[in-house]
């Protein structure tokens, strides 16, 4: 049998608990790679706040071309350091990779693994199981705008949102394609088109046109403010949600709470067929850095999405099952009510994954 080609993964732990959770995700990934003989090669890159403060460098010149050509995926822990209040390095690296690699799909699954983790009354695994497709390359994140009379009493700040027909269409289409592939019932598009009469009206028109091409999938529109209430009151009605960059950011932190908190939320930044990036939804939580309290499950679930995307669906499922089992057994960090440390959870998940493959 011929050897499958190596899949190189750039591992960027980043700052704070990003380092802690990435170490565990790598531990679990390495266990999976060993037992399933996956052709993964992980290359660690120390592009963190320390390095930025020392050298002034953020995303090195040529890095994106290198990723495009020589890497199958990028894995990121988290960025953010109190010593860099403007988030310069985080913006250059994290948003630089999302935008630079044109990773237009930010896929954020919302899944409850144990009812005890859900702060909503009487909700079970059956009620919390939906997916958010967040547009990831435009909207309010384009950094277009400026100041006039900055620092004076007459100061004006302008911050633009950009919505392109192509950009809106491809994320909506991705949501419908996902619904078809995964046997989902409905795609719900959330905007604020009652107020944003240009940008979000474009979303409305494109959504109607694309929805018409998918007669087998129901389509529904909600204003995002109404959606947030629906999320809390009737989460069981949600299936696939598609929305713009900023609204997707906000509603996925709310959704993370349904799953047990930010420590449980996973994400994939995708451009099908190209080098993609995977990261937990949470940030660098500086107060927990190095304390052993960070929950590595969101990072591990993000690496499960990565394995699935790289064609290792069975291994990806094993990682998810290992997380689900640890949660059910109360083998967790304190944010989920357990008493294990970050690395104890990683050790346990790695052992479970290895045992699954052998059984
Ligand atoms: P955060 O996600 O870092 O933390 C918010 C709170 O959520 C924490 O105080 C903690 O109570 C909890 N939490 C988050 N992750 C956890 C985990 N793995 N285990 C247990 N508890 C966890 O958000 P923040 O405090 O608003 O931001 C801190 C820094 O991270 C800022 O610099 C921010 O800009 C940055 N940030 C980065 C990303 C990213 O890299 N993708 C995402 C969000 C925030
Ligand atoms: C996220 C984060 C980022 C975002 C920040 C850190 C730039 O909140 O990944 O959800 O707003 O996209
Ligand atoms: Mn966010």
Image: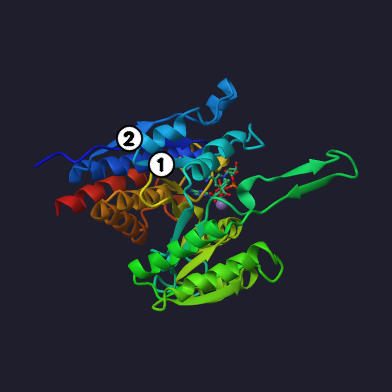
In the image, farthest residue toward the right: 153
Q: Is residue 55 above or below residue 344?
A: above
- Note whether residue 236 is visible: no
| Residue in the picture at 33% in, 52% down | 309
Location of the N terminus by quadrant is top left
CB atoms at circles 2 and 1 under 8 Å apart?
Answer: yes
Q: Secondary structure at mark 2?
A: strand
Name the foreground residue: 317 vs 152.
152
Which numbered marker is on residue 42? 2
Mark 1, other Cα within 10 Å: few <14 / some 14–19 / many ≥20: many
Q: Nearer the viewer, residue 18 or 226?
A: 226
Figure check: 220 above or below 72: below
> In this view, which residue lies farthest toward the left?
1
At label 2, counting other C-alpha atoms closer than 10 Å, the crowd grade (few under 14, some 14-19, many 20 or more) is some
- Circle 1 SS class: strand
Residue at 43 percent of width and 34 percent of height: 65
Colour scheme of this structure image?
rainbow
Residue 268 in picture, x, y percent from top left: 43, 51
Above or below 167: residue 49? above
Numbered label attached to residue 117:
none
Q: Nearer the viewer, residue 344 or 144?
A: 144
Q: Is residue 148 left or right of residue 219?
A: right
């Amino acid at each position: 049998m011929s050897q499958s080609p190596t899949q190189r993964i750039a591992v960027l732990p980043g700052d704070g608990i990003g380092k802690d959770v990435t170490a565990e995700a790598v531990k679990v990934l390495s266990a999976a790679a060993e037992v399933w003989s996956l052709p993964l090669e992980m290359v660690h890159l120390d592009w963190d706040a320390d390095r930025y403060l020392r050298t002034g460098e953020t995303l090195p010149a040529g890095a994106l071309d290198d990723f495009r050509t020589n890497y199958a995926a990028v894995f990121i822990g988290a960025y953010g350091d109190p010593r860099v209040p403007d988030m310069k390095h985080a913006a250059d690296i994290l948003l630089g990779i999302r935008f630079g690699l044109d990773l237009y799909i930010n896929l954020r699954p919302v899944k409850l693994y144990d009812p005890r983790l859900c702060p909503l009354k009487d909700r079970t695994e059956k009620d919390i199981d939906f997916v958010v497709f967040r547009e990831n390359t435009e909207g309010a994140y384009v950094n277009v705008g400026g100041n006039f009379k900055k620092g004076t009493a007459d100061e004006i700040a302008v911050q633009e949102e950009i919505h392109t027909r192509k950009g809106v269409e491809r994320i909506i289409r991705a949501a419908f394609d996902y619904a078809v592939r995964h046997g989902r019932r409905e795609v719900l598009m959330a905007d604020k088109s009652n107020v944003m009469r240009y940008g979000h009206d474009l979303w409305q028109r494109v959504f109607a046109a694309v929805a018409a091409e998918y007669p087998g999938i129901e389509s529904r529109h909600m204003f995002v403010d109404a959606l947030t209430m629906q999320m809390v009151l009737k989460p069981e009605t949600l299936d696939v949600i598609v929305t713009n960059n900023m609204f997707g950011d906000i509603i996925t932190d709310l959704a993370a709470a349904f799953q047990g908190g930010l420590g449980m939320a996973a994400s994939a930044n995708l451009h099908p067929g190209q080098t993609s990036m995977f990261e937990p939804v949470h940030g660098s939580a500086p107060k927990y850095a190095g304390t052993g309290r960070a929950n590595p499950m969101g990072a591990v679930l993000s690496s499960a999405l990565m394995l699935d995307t790289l064609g290792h669906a069975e291994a990806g499922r094993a990682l998810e099952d290992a997380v689900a089992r640890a949660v059910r057994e109360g083998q967790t960090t304190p944010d989920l009510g357990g008493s294990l440390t970050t690395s104890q959870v990683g050790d346990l998940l790695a052992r479970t994954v290895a045992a699954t493959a052998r059984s």
